[in-house]
Image (cartoon, rainbow, N blue to C red):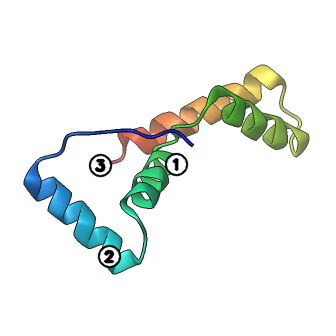
Amino acid sequence: MSRLTITLSEARYRALKEASAQRDKTIGQLIDESLDFYGIKSRQDARDLVRRARAHSKLSEDQALAVAQEQVRAVRRKP
């Protein structure tokens, strides 16, 4: 697993630390879950997701990829 150093405001850091304690998770776990929520995946993970979706549908690879991309865009547009 890779390590990452980020700079946050003191207020943001405190809020993140409090949220992690309330949820009984590490800060890293919260950040990882947030990245999943926003659809940030490796290309291979995204391809695997599209492959699994295609296996359960009658869409072509291009159609399945287009649907997946639209879903990611929709999630990112939500406030």
Task: Between label 3 and label 1, give the one nearer the viewer.
Answer: 1
Badge 3 or badge 1: first in the primary sequence: 1
The residue that label 2 is drawn on is 21
SS at badge 1: helix
The residue that label 1 is drawn on is 36
Are there few (<14), some (14-19), or many (20+) residues within 10 Å of tag 1?
few
Q: How far is disc 2 from disc 3 in space, using C-alphas?
A: 25 Å
Are there few (<14), some (14-19), or many (20+) residues within 10 Å of tag 3?
few
Q: How far is disc 2 from disc 1 in space, using C-alphas?
A: 20 Å
Percent x, y of residue 76: 41, 40
Are there few (<14), some (14-19), or many (20+) residues within 10 Å of tag 2?
few
Badge 2 or badge 3: first in the primary sequence: 2
Q: Which mark is residue 13?
A: none
Q: Are marks 2 and 3 in contact (CB under 8 Å)?
A: no
| Amino acid found under the numbered disc labelled 2 | Ala
Quarter of the image with the N terminus in it:
top right
